[in-house]
Amino acid sequence: MLPASPADFEARSEEDQQRFFEDVLGRAHRAEAAVGTVIRDLVVAGQRIRLVYAGQALDGLLTPALAHLLASHDGDPDLLLHVWDSAGSGVEMCPPPVAAHCFSERGDIWTFESDRWKSAFLIGDYSLSVLDLAAGEGVCWVRSGTGLPYWTIASPFRALFNWWLSERDAQLVHGAVVGTGEGGVLIVGKGGVGKSTTALSCLAAGFDYVGDDYVVLAGGDVPTAFSLYQTAKLDPDAAQRFDWLVPSPAGGRPTAAGDKAVMHIRDHRPQQLAAAMPLRAVLTPAFADGPDTQVRPIAADALLGPALYTTMAQLPHAGPRTLALIERQVRRLPCYRLELGRDVDRVPAVIAALLTQLEGCAAAPPPARPRPLVSVVIPVYNGIEFLPAAIESILAQGYPALEIIVVDDGVGIAIRDAVATLPVEVRLLPKRNGGAADARNAGIRAASGELIAFLDVDDLWAPGKLIASVEWLEDHPATDVVIGGAQLFRQPAPGEPISFVGSPAESYPYYIGAGLYRRRAFEAIGSFDAGLRFGEDTDWFARAVERGLVVDRLEATSLMVRRHADNQTAARTALELVPLQLARNALLRKRGGAP
């Protein structure tokens, strides 16, 4: 639970974060002394990175994905990483430095927000990554090398690499890069849309291969992709199509439902591995009905979402810097939708023809004014059937810089199934049921953007709401919150016509989903009162007014509020919706007490 207090958002001191780093580093040195070391040097996007393994086991599991980047031990490294596990070394990790609620699904450790000391804990492989950016030294710890998930074996050290490279104008991007002598294409999109199938089809046709899953994107005169992992991950069914690729013996074969097979390209087509490649275009694939594959130009704004969603969802502490680096490079390249036909063998010829067509074309200039990142929080308990429509209303805004966070307020398996069918990648935050206010608070803590928005799962955003709200905040830097009107509506069933109920001028003035909020607004007055099951919106805006936040109103409809039998507020009286507790809270604040 998130108590409604500004203290919840206060970062731990630099000294606290330094002490934690030094404790972890000291234990890494003890592990190395206990079992000896294996040292590997890599060159990643021009940076020399030295891996010091405590013992041999993790070296055998994690180095193969990076084997094509191995280099001799020449001079001091730019970045030194210590890698160890407790099971193999006998050295235990120190106790957690923060309470359990400070650990997020993505790996962020909330309240550890230093510009120098970086930290992330990933529950999926039970690993901790810490980095001192100033000293160029970090640590990766796992509890045990036994049973590491396939994604760790295929793409190790992602957080550490990204923290280091993003300080050097480079950025890890979830995508594949293949190409010919004319240059390469960056292929982006959520899992399951055909990125790996496209990349491996091109590899089989003789293309050069920079990577699949994650590559490094950097600037310069021409946007360039650098190789990071020489692995490919495929569902078992898709792996049968590429039977010439044999899964890696180091954890490469699926062992559980949902696992993917991990292949090492270096074992099969080493001559086609490219360390770097200039980019000529960005593609996002989609499966088509016909046999033929086609490419169609699309606007950069339409492609930024696919380029950003999974990257933002998987990399700890990804935020505005991530957005800016990716957007700057994507906008310099022509963008296309790759409509994949059923005949996969024809895909490489279509991409080769595109690269020939683009040879010698000048890159587009970078944008003058990148859009700020907006984190959209959707709490879900009841009404899961409305989730696709809610997401569609967000995407219809046409806003490129989005992070969508779906908070599972105790729904369970059903919401995971629903999220898997969405047309975009979202961050799913599971938690115990605590009510809408508590769920929104969890989303606030997980949000990467400086601008935060909310949408209840059964509501819709009105067309143009987001761009109008963002532009208002950009033009009015003193404004903390901008909020529009709300239109009530009924819709008998999905896809059927809707009918309006009343007018926006008559609706409740403080619908949370009608607003766009600067992060600083929550830092100033705290989060929503999780003790209120109703009226948390009235309570929050009352605190905002009392404490002098600048709340501006748009003369426009921003939110469509669905009326249906399962509304949380259906059939409630006005007294129930604005309980006496709100008056009590206001009185306490006037007297200088909580909340």
Image (cartoon, rainbow, N blue to C red):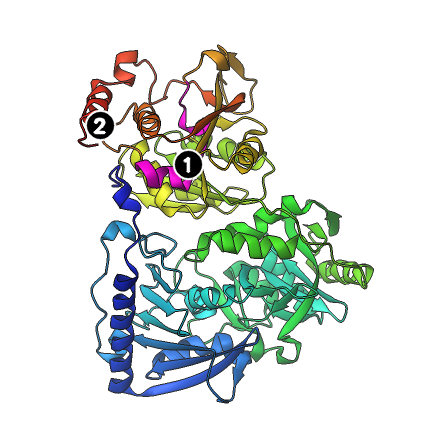
Residue 189 seen in the figure: no
Disc 2 crowd rating (10 Å Cα; few below 14, some 14-19, many 20+) is some
Q: Is residue 125 left or right of residue 213?
A: left
In contact (CB < 8 Å): disc 1 and disc 2? no
Instruction: Specify the segment rendered in magenta.
Output: 509-526
Q: Image quarter for residue 380?
A: top left
Q: Is residue 520 magenta?
A: yes
| Residue 375 sits above or below residue 589 on the image | below
The residue drawn where x is 22% and y is 27% is 589
Per the model, the C-alpha gap separating discs 1 and 2 is 29 Å
Q: Nearer the viewer, residue 300 or 105?
A: 300
| Residue 352 sits above or below residue 586 on the image | below
Tell me residue 514's x, y (percent). 46, 27
Q: Is residue 146 left or right of residue 504?
A: left
Q: Say what secondary structure mark 1 lies in.
A: strand
Tell me residue 405's x, y (percent). 43, 43
The residue that mark 2 highlights is 589
Q: Image quarter for residue 61?
A: bottom left
Disc 1 crowd rating (10 Å Cα; few below 14, some 14-19, many 20+) is many
Q: Image quarter for residue 107?
A: bottom left
> If the image is split into quadrants, where does the N terminus sit?
top left
> If the image is split into quadrants, where does the C terminus sit?
top left
Q: Earlier in the sequence, mark 1 or mark 2?
A: 1
Amino acid tagged 1: Ile
Amino acid tagged 2: Arg
Label of residue 378 in the image: 1
Q: Say what secondary structure mark 2 lies in.
A: helix
Tell me residue 424's x, y (percent). 53, 44
